[in-house]
Image: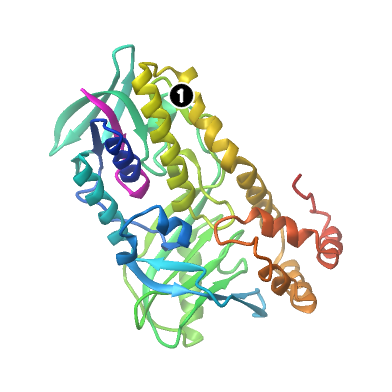
Amino acid sequence: MYDVIVIGAGIIGSYTAKELARLGHSVAALEKNPEPGCKTSCTGIVSQACLDMLPGSHSAIQREARSATVFSPDSNHLRIKRETTQAYILDRMALDRLVAEQAGQTGVEYFFSTPAIDLQSDDRGVHVNATRDARPLKLSARACVIACGTAPGLIRQLGMGRIRQYAHGAQTEVSCKNIDEVEVYSGRHFAPGFFAWLVPTMPGKAKAGLLSSTNPGTSITNLLRYLERQGKIQSASHYISYGSIPLKPLTKTYNHRILVVGDAAGQVKPTTGGGIYFGLICAGLAAQTLDESLRAGDLSARRLALYQKRWHKILKHELDIDYWAHRFYQGLTDKQVDHIFQVILRHGIHESLLASPDITFDWHGKVIVDAIRHRSLQRSLEKFKLFRPPA
């Protein structure tokens, strides 16, 4: 019997497993794919704070980012730039492999090509039924962490509820020229309710993708055709990766002997769909809570509820503001989005926000609140009769 089984060996699952092993616990990690990092639809843009949580991750950096250009539906644009690096564009597959390798060196035992089918929890432990090489495999542990991304079956089975709101993403690698900074596109033609992007990675290469509230396949076709007409890309990969991003967290991220982290728990920014940094924060809290509970010999739901209290204290208000901002933006027409762009440009609102030392890449709540407090923007927003500012 292991101390902990971690289901899912992406960055968040491997990081949780590594932290638990570092604290002296025996850990098994189950992953349905044949190796770490073999499938990801994440763009891989992270902050310095995120990199600092992942030792050795600088080896996965493809490019630094100091600026971005954001386009309105009618092609108005505003440029956001700071003199220092604001984010790093990573090779996500390389990063997944790096974190898994570090976890393995710490003592985590990996089971690849081993999807978890179901699990049960009783007074003796957690029992996971999986398959490996088409054969049944059963593993047991004192506790379990679910970190398998947007795979809600296990969570529903355990009576922990379900995430009902998702964004749908699509991304592909493209050949390009003269693309030196991140470009973001708004408009319902490309990304209904969300946005699209063109992110340079290596010389002559970029990632083109989007989040959408509806059919991402149609949306990314529209995006790629537009970028080709504009001469920004020369060709696109035949392979398009698809994925879903939760927009609200689970109501309950703990149960008897079980914790849920990362995308599986909905610990994702609703504004951008970014989940690495928030997921790492919660993974650290999950490892801390399990370490304390394992040593105390108490893995009850009541004891493990401390995990949710801890991550709520750090993230819940931020996620609530971000979700409000997403819902507000989702309700705007393209014409209204264009009007907001014009107000921001006319009054230099983006420049005043960038001048604030409190504005960071990871925490969007303060940017949102500061923006809507700007009187000229507030007056415009109130005209739309959709304006319900967060507390």
- Image coordinates of residue 281 in percent, x first then y, are 46, 45
Residue at x 22% of width, y 43% of height:
106
Q: Secondary structure at mark 1?
A: helix
- Up-down relation of residue 250 to residue 318 (above or below): above
- Image coordinates of residue 383 in percent, x first then y, are 86, 61
- Up-down relation of residue 114 to residue 345 (above or below): above
- Image coordinates of residue 168 in percent, x first then y, are 49, 54
In-image side of 9 versus 343 (left or right):
left
Question: What crowding class fits label 1: few (fewer than 14 Cα within 10 Å), some (14-19), or many (20 or more)?
Answer: many
Which image quadrant for residue 117?
top left
Q: Which residue is mark 1?
A: 304
Residue 250 visible at all: no
Q: Is residue 9 magenta?
A: yes
Residue at x 43% of width, y 73% of height:
64
Residue in the foreground of this view, choosing between 129 and 219: 129
In-image side of 341 versus 226 (left or right):
right
Q: Which residues are magenta?
A: 1-12
